[in-house]
Amino acid sequence: MLGIGLGWALAVPKWPGRTLLDLAVTLPLVFPPIALGFFLLLVLGRRSPIGQWLDQTFGISFIFTFEGVLLASVVAGLPLVVKPIEAAIAGVSRRLGEASRTLGRSEWDTLVRVILPNVRGAIVAGLVLGTARSLGEVGITLMLGGNIVGRTNTVSLEIYNAVFNGEYLRGVVLSVLLGFASIAVFVVMRRATTARSGHGPAFA
């Protein structure tokens, strides 16, 4: 839902703050993950103003918790979700969106009944790519989650732990499992892309 909302917002050209939002969404693709994780650690730490406010107001802490691992996954995978959706919505909105608005439909009705059905392939592809990226994330997760065994460690961090401890066989097994997951992601993405190309535009 976050990816769809951001993709829809970025597909609308020339509004105040669009460039800043685009930069924030794209940053995880070009910024070193470990540095980005360190920045989030400083911003959301228990001693930071934002971290204290979140803890006191909502009881949420992103440092060395499951919520931190979840945030790391979202930050890492979000650009790969948003960008395909943004490009697809921009193309559809210029054609079918304008026709829908000409027929008197509201922006919400146009989004739900016209735009989204025609970009479902991009939504699936973006979700699959974002999920695959989050599965392999290490830097941001290590900074926020802390690699606590049994609590905040992920498969990728377990591979790191196995190699660090000299458990190479365990590292190989985990790497193979993660490789199979990546292949499954690729297969799903190919099928979604094929299904998308095999259907014409929908105008409910």
Image (tube, rainbow, N blue to C red):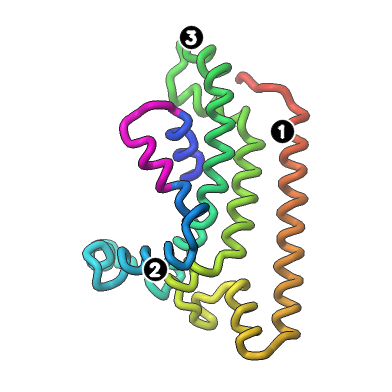
In the picture provided, is 137 more to the left or to the right than 202?
left
Is residue 32 at all visible to an observer of this figure?
yes
Point out residue 183 in the picture as x, y percentages from the top left corner.
Answer: 76, 58
Query: Of helix, strand and loop, which one carries label 1?
Result: helix
Please report whichever mark, 3 or 2, sits nearer to the chain's N-terminal start. 2
Please report whichever mark, 2 or 1, sits nearer to the chain's N-terminal start. 2
Q: Quadrant of residue 185?
A: bottom right
Q: Which residue is mark 3?
A: 102
Point out residue 50 in the picture as x, y percentages from the top left corner.
Answer: 25, 62
In the picture provided, is 100 more to the left or to the right than 192?
left
- The amino acid type found where label 1 is placed reads Arg
Question: What crowding class fits label 1: few (fewer than 14 Cα within 10 Å), some (14-19), or many (20 or more)?
Answer: some
Query: Of helix, strand and loop, which one carries label 2?
Result: helix
Marker disc for residue 196? 1
- Residue at 45% x, 34% y: name it: 10
User: Mark 1 to mark 3: distance in Å?
Assistant: 26 Å
- The amino acid type found where label 3 is placed reads Thr
The question of residue 141 being in magenta is answered with no
Q: Which residue is mark 2?
A: 38
Q: Over which residues does the magenta segment extend?
A: 12-24
Question: What crowding class fits label 3: few (fewer than 14 Cα within 10 Å), some (14-19), or many (20 or more)?
Answer: few
User: Mark 2 to mark 1: distance in Å?
Assistant: 39 Å
